[in-house]
Image (cartoon, rainbow, N blue to C red):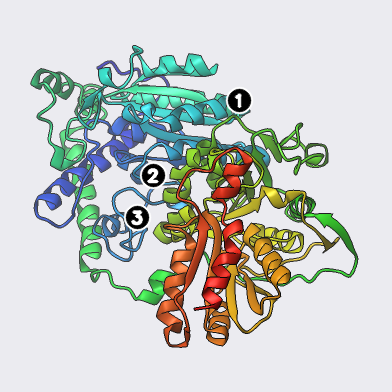
Amino acid sequence: MIYNRKHFSDVELLDLYKALLKPRLIEEKMLILLRQGKISKWFSGIGQEAISVGVTTALNEQDYILPMHRNLGVLTSRDVPLHKLFSQWQGKKKGYTKGRDRSFHFGVLAHKIIGMISHLGPQLGVANGIALANILKNEAGIAVVFSGDGGTSEGDFHEALNVAAVWDLPVLFCVENNGYGLSTPSSQQFKCENIADKGIGYGMESHIINGNNILEVYSKVKEIAEDVRKKPRPVLLEFKTFRMRGHEEASGTKYVPQELLNEWSLKDPVENFVAFLKKEMILTIENELQIKDKFTKELNEHLKIAFDEKETSSTVEKELADVYKKTNYVEIKPQLETTNIRFIDAISQGLKQSMERFGDMVIMGQDIAEYGGVFKITEGFLEKFGANRVRNTPICESSIIEAAYGLSICGIKSVVELQFSDFVTSGFNPIINLLAKSHYRWNQNSDIVLRMPCGAGVGAGPFHSQTNEAWFTKTPGLKVVYPAFPYDAKGLLATSIEDENPVLFFEHKALYRSVYQEVPDSYYTIPLGKATLLNEGNDISIITYGAGVHWALNEVKKHQISADIIDLRTLQPLDTETIYKSVKKTGKALILQEDTLFGGIASDISALITENCFKYLDAPIKRVGSLETPIPFAKNLEDMFLPKNRLYANIVELLNY
């Protein structure tokens, strides 16, 4: 291997050697502990250390780094305390996830390191959000994110590079091309000769770097990073390297030809650099032994701290308390002046006032800028708040949700408009596996609201009419809001934005322009998790939300039924107190949802009532929902699908039980 000293002093070269050696020694120790059963899993980066170390040491302290499984050198080069790492890998409480996650699935904000999730691709988009935050704050920092060659096959890779290119974001996309995605060779992962070639398709600068040459990695990355600070843009870096051990230790390397292992063993980044330093008379055998002894002593001291720590323990209360970031609700009462406005106007007004209240808040979504959104909710926002804060996005729900998470890491609130709630499927992974689990795993909140225009009754067919709240009420870590009236919509949206947890805010399209109400002109909040009793009666409790509220009110008024009508407003958290109180009074409960019946939230509410109010019931609990079909387009078929025309018959049946 050829090393070019360039301007490196002897001290700098020795420092790079130490930085390169430390993760190698830790890895070798971890492999021993794995065999001893003292850690459960290990993803080895042996043979690839020069990339992590070279990249990290070439950056500034304020630059964020988003590493992967094999980037131990990122953590050691940023001086992350070893005993904390050892506790993390043993599942101890003083680790970065308190025993709730393993491996490198954590972040260390103090060191500007953001860890991965097992789905690999999402952190590419997270880097975009961090880089965007740097631009919005007029800071010169850059985001550096790692991926393996296998990860470049994921859609997140395309989305992230495309967004970064379109927005000129200062991101270094570092791809460690080690020849295999677990056991699948690169020839079965992509057809182009080099991953760097993909940069051409995004109009993006790209480079190929010898990932086993510490001086080449350091010099090239430092040069590029300094240039990106002056001229913000994304750069794709492909590091040619090789993974000398299995994907994780249990996988082994039997699928790798022995001649390939032999070839790359001669390119070992540590051994080659040691040979170079000795040839240059910079490193002696005595000095080498002293350095190794010092690291070994440090390693053993920190291992002892981790080993001496007690096994992880917790309580149900502590575990539940960490699912969400604790936020103190502050009631802001409305002023007296009101205007009779539509549901859609209340959403727009609430969004605009939140943009004014939080001066760096960002709105992102397809067609929301000049066009004002497909429903015109953000019309005029671009002129008022500017293109930095009102951002049109490419069609890429996943990457934009990931970018929102990156903004949250940097302390910036964001609202993402999913053009239709149906389209959330394209962003399902980061919502379920990143946003929802992040605070519980490593104490990083997701200060994000996802606006979800939803619902049938407008003849939009199977792909624009779903009301899919049950996908998310099931997932711990998410909050779900579903208003039925303009007053509630405005106040609950304000609270959702103030809340520092991820909130899915459902807006029924059929209510947008059909429901009017006197709504305060001023900014105000409404607490999440509080239902409202819209109608009082003694014979039956009708529990519903969204468009169902209006169907229930219509039937009760039309047929003079003595009924409690509960508008849940918030589905997660759920106001069970109001539900139980009503059911205990009336003895009969009907739960109405627009969603298809099986697996919907009505099923869980029914179970909760059974478990908590059984002795008060005078009849079986009745659930009413849509047919078990996709939502049809033709009006007569859609009317048949929806439960509103079956509601009265079900009420009568329950009353007559």
Q: Is residue 162 left or right of residue 52?
A: right
Residue at the spot of label 2 = 116
Label 3's element?
Answer: loop
Task: Point out residue 398 in the picture as x, y percentages from the top left corner.
Answer: 50, 38
In depth, the one of 77 and 593 nearer the eye is 593
Q: Is residue 88 above or below residue 379?
A: below
User: Is residue 60 visible to the viewer in this orientation of the structure?
Assistant: no
Q: Is residue 141 left or right of residue 149?
A: right
Task: Point out residue 5 in the picture as x, y percentages from the top left corner.
Answer: 36, 20
Crowd tier of the residue under label 3, counting other residues whose Cα lies within 10 Å: few below 14, some 14–19, many 20 or above: few
Residue at the spot of label 3 = 81
Which residue extends farthest right? 337
Q: Quadrant of the N terminus?
A: top left
Image mark for residue 166: 1
Front disc: 2 or 3: 2
Crowd tier of the residue under label 2, counting other residues whose Cα lies within 10 Å: few below 14, some 14–19, many 20 or above: many
Q: Amino acid at mark 2?
A: Met
Task: Point out residue 230 in the picture as x, y percentages from the top left corner.
Answer: 62, 27
Q: Amino acid at mark 1?
A: Val
Is tag 1's residue or tag 3's residue first in the polypeptide sequence? 3
In depth, the one of 570 and 523 nearer the eye is 570
Label 2's element?
Answer: loop
Is tag 2's residue or tag 3's residue first in the polypeptide sequence? 3
Crowd tier of the residue under label 1, counting other residues whose Cα lies within 10 Å: few below 14, some 14–19, many 20 or above: some
